[in-house]
Structures are given as structure tokens and as C-alpha cells.
Amino acid sequence: MVSISLEQVGVSLGRRTVVRNASATFRAGALAGIVGPNGAGKSTLARAMLALVPHIGRILVDDAEVATMPRAELARRVAYLPQGQTLHWPLTVERLVELGRLPHLAPMSRIGDADGAAIERAIERADIAALRDRVATELSGGERARVLLARALAVEAPALIADEPLASLDPGHQIDVMELLHGEARAGALVIAVLHDLTMAARYCDRLVLIDRGTIVADGTPAEVLTPANLKSVYGIDARVELAGDWPTVTALGRSR
Amino acid sequence: MTISRPLLIAGLIALTLAAAIGSILFGPVHLSLARMIAAFTGHGDRIATTILLELRLPRMLLGLGVGAMLGLAGAALQGYLRNPLAEPSVLGTSNAASLGAVAALYFGLAALHPVVLPVLAVLGALLSLAGLSALAGRSESPLTLILAGIAIATLATAGVSLALNLSPNPFAAMEIMTWLLGSLENRSFEHVWIAYPCIAIGGLLLLWDGRALDALTLGEDGAQALGVDLRRTRIRLLLGTAIGVGGAVAVSGAIGFIGLIVPHLVRPLTDRSPSAILIPSAIGGAALLTFADVAVRLIDTRNELKLGVVTAFLGVPVFLIHLMRERRLW
């Protein structure tokens, strides 16, 4: 069972310290959300877990440090869905999903049967079979989000980190994506998602990590983390938190004075 | 208009073979087919054998090799820099190789031995690589690399202009200008032996990272998270371009636009992924440059037409078509 552990992690970008003294452990079988205001350091923390930015402290995937792990090895263990939907070339959906098999391929080698099967599974799970021959740059935002998610699923890594997978999606597509991430976690994967929508985060995540100015200020179940006091101190808002079924819903009432 | 990859490659190989045969058949001296066959089978007269084996054969081989290298380097750089307007000169490589060659002409070193000029050109390309690495540092941003490349290219072009400006006599200036126009005329197997090892090493280095170029479609973070070591990819790409293009420009002179237009010509026939256009661009480059070199011999002009001039003219219609497509006029 895969795990990702952060031990007193700090990240500086240029002269600015973006993440301070962050410690947390993420385990398989759960969907964890990283939440916090703009510029809090959520994406930077996610990028540090993939060794995309240098860090101090230790980040371990199972028992191996990401800083010294070969890139391909890390890529096979942790799949990543970057922020945004940038695509530099007009690839077909199928070719795009195929990129997910890259960590498993030697240079100049061909896609094998096992890779083909993994690609088919990812296409099926993301429900994009009808789009497979379309050019990815010509898809709508919602379609493209599902295709990029399928690309990350095609890695078939035991862990998946998704950075703002709901950005620019309508509520229906947001639910589709969260159901998919939730399903992956239920199937045994370790899933971490950086999220802005607190109600979506509360609805689908087993656990939330709240970050403020680079520091983890709360870590627990959505009901434990999304309290009016935390929302006031971190987001600077007065909010009403109500329980809807098993999860809290957050309504921002206004800026706190 | 995607066509299957085996069909595309087969079509391009057929075109390249046609260009290669044309390059052997046509020249200022008309040779009958019987004389040519006799020369190739070792029973030909001395003149036909000399023309075919010592002039046309190395010229054909250089046309194929140089064209392949320029096409491949253009495709790899467009993929790496994620910029469809990239070509070898964007990194200053071909300009630096030109400066090396011009230095050989300016200082009269080229007259000492035929290999001095190409060797200095390759050295110029390698020096540009060192300059590029120093200027771009460890940054993985394509913009930093392009800016560093423009700085190197500008410096090399200034050096060439200085050599022309200060040339000791009009003949030296003329010699430099003629070389700068690019040509495969009067090349020998010595040139082939200089260019081909460089092209082979450069080509392999550029082909190595096809999948990494595809992964860069997702941006730098996306590619690295797929296991791509961007630092190593960049080293291989820069080394491959410097060695391969340096070796090619060293024997052909400054031939532009092949690296720019060939990837544009083959891309619509592929699935448009950067790796899918590498080999077709190499074969297409070989065919296009060799055809251009045949055209140079067939077009009757008062002064000898230079290959670099023809390839520059070829670039115009390709970009007009792209412009019209962009403006949705066609």
C-alpha cells in the first residue's frame, strides 16, 4: 500500500518562502483535499511531492525520498495532473492518453500490449471512448478535463496528485471529475487533489489539509477542518457551515471585519 | 489528412530515391545511360567515371545527408521549443558554423587543405554550444534558450559582417559571399567523410528524445512528472543540433529554410505529435534538398544559381499557404 509522507517540508521560490515546516502523511484508499486561499502554497506543495521544485525536509513515497529517486521511478509511483489545460500541439485524444504510458517505456521503444490495455482502461474509466479520434485542442473545457484525467489514469500509478482538476468546469463536470477521483481512492489508490471549491472538497474528500501562507493550519475530516473559525482566520470570511447529510456545506456570507 | 505512417514513410522514401536518381542523372555534362552504367560497373571511360563517382555521387550523398539533418533538427527543435517557427538557426548553431567557415576563408586557411574549412565550421558550431549553455544556464524555459540562441546568432552574424567589411581584397569578400549562399557543387568524398559522422551522431541524439518531445506537449511540469529528465533531454538536443547541423553546414554553406519548412510540410500528414514528424522530416528534408540541388543544375542562369537561394525561395509559398490557412482564406 503506497504512502506519501512529508516531514518538515519547506519550499522557497527565489527569495520567497512558499511552504513552511509542512508535515503530513497520505495513505492509500483515501481521497485527500488540499485547500486554502490563493497563493497559500497548495500547488507548490503538490509540485514538491513530485520533485518539480526543490525542497528542504523530507518527502517520502513509501520509504524512498523523492529528491533522489530517478524521475521515471517517481513517475511510475505517482501520477500527476498539472494545473491548467495547456496543450502545445493538437494531438488526438488517443495519442494524448498514450503519453501516460511514457514512464513505463524505454526510449525509442513501441507501445506494448500491456500499455494498450492500460490506455483502454483509462479511456473507459474517464468515459471518453467517443472522443478518442478527436483533436484534444478542439474539445470543450469539460471534455478536455476528462481527457487529461484519463492521461493521468493511464500511468496506472498507485498514487495520483491532481492540481485544481475542477478549474473552469461547470457543476456537472465538477461532479463527474470528483466521482472519478473518489472512485480511484475507493479502488485502493492514494489520491490528493488541490481544490478551491470547499463544498465539493467536503462532499467528496475523506480528509482535508488546510494551508494558510505556506503553513498547514488544520488537518482532519472535512467537518473538523471547515469550521467557521478556520474559515475566518484563513480566508478572512464569515461563513455559514451546515451539515448536509454526512458532509458540511459552506456558504460564504461576506468578508469578516 | 493523416495518412498511415508506413505509407507516409514509403512515399517519402520513394521521393528521396527519385531525387537521388535525378542527382546522378543530371549535370552540366550530358552522359548517356549506357556510359553511366558502364562507369558504375567499373567498365566506363575515365571522364564518365570521374564525373559520376567523384562529383555526382558525393554531391548526391551530401544532398541527402545535409537535407536529412536540417529537416530532423528543425522538427526536433520545433518540438522541444514548442514553437512551429523554430529551426536550427534559432539556436545560433548554423550562424556559428558559418562564422567558423568564414574565418577559414578570411585568414586564407581554407586554401591550405579542403578539410580546414569544414573542420573550423564544426568547431564554430561546438563553440556556439558552449556559449549557449553559459548564457542559458540551468533554466529549462524555452524562452531563455531562444534568447541565448538569438544572442549567439547575432554575434556570429556580426562576425561574418566584420569579415566581409575588413576583407583584404574584393576576391576574398566574393569568396565569402559565395560560400554564404550555400552550395553542394564541387564537393568530394572528403566532405562526405566529414559530414556523415557528424550527421549520424547528431541524428541519433535528436531521435533519442522523441517521446520526451511528445510529453512536452503537456508543458514542463507535465513532462517531468511523466519521468522525463528535461536537463538531459536538453543536453542531447543541443549537442545533436551542434554536431549534426555544424557538420552539415560545414560542407554545404548556409542553407536555410529546410529545417523550417519540411516539418510544416509533413506535419499535416501525421498525427501531429512531435515524435511522429522526426523521421518523416529527415526523409523529407533529404528529398527536398536533393531535388533543389537538381533544380539548381537544370535551371539555366547566366551566373551559377546557388542552392541556398533556391531553398529560400521554396520557403515563401509554404508560409503563404500557412498564412492563408490561418486567415481561413483557404
Image (cartoon, helix red, strand yellow):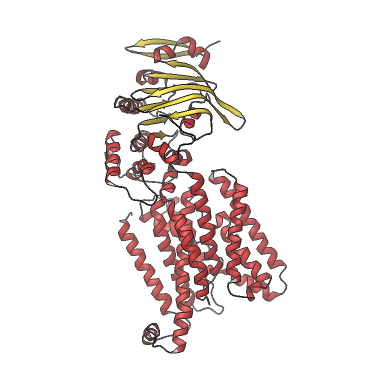
Q: Is residue B268 above or below residue A75?
A: below
Residue B79 appears at what percent x and percent y? Answer: 46, 50
* Rendered residue at 44%/17% (across/down): A219
Q: Quadrant of residue B170?
A: bottom right
Q: Quadrant of residue A152?
A: top left
Image quadrant occupied by the N terminus of chain B? bottom left
Out of B314 and A88, give the one closest to the viewer: A88
* Rendered residue at 28%/33% (across/down): A125
Residue A1 appears at what percent x and percent y? Answer: 34, 27
Image quadrant occupied by the C terminus of chain B? bottom left
Q: Is residue B124 above or below residue B49?
A: above
**Relative to B45, B143 lies left or right:** right
Query: Would residue A140 be seen by someone viewing this image from the given angle?
Result: no
* Number of numbered tags placed on the structure image: 0
Residue A145 appears at what percent x and percent y? Answer: 37, 34
Out of B165 and B282, give the one closest to the viewer: B282
Residue A206 appears at what percent x and percent y? Answer: 36, 19
Query: Would residue B215 be seen by someone viewing this image from the given angle?
Result: yes
**Relative to B55, B169 lies left or right:** right
Out of B113 and B270, give the one closest to the viewer: B113
**Relative to B91, A59 lies left or right:** left
Out of B285 and B327, give the one closest to the viewer: B285
* Rendered residue at 59%/50% (across/down): B133
* Rendered residue at 30%/43% (across/down): A115
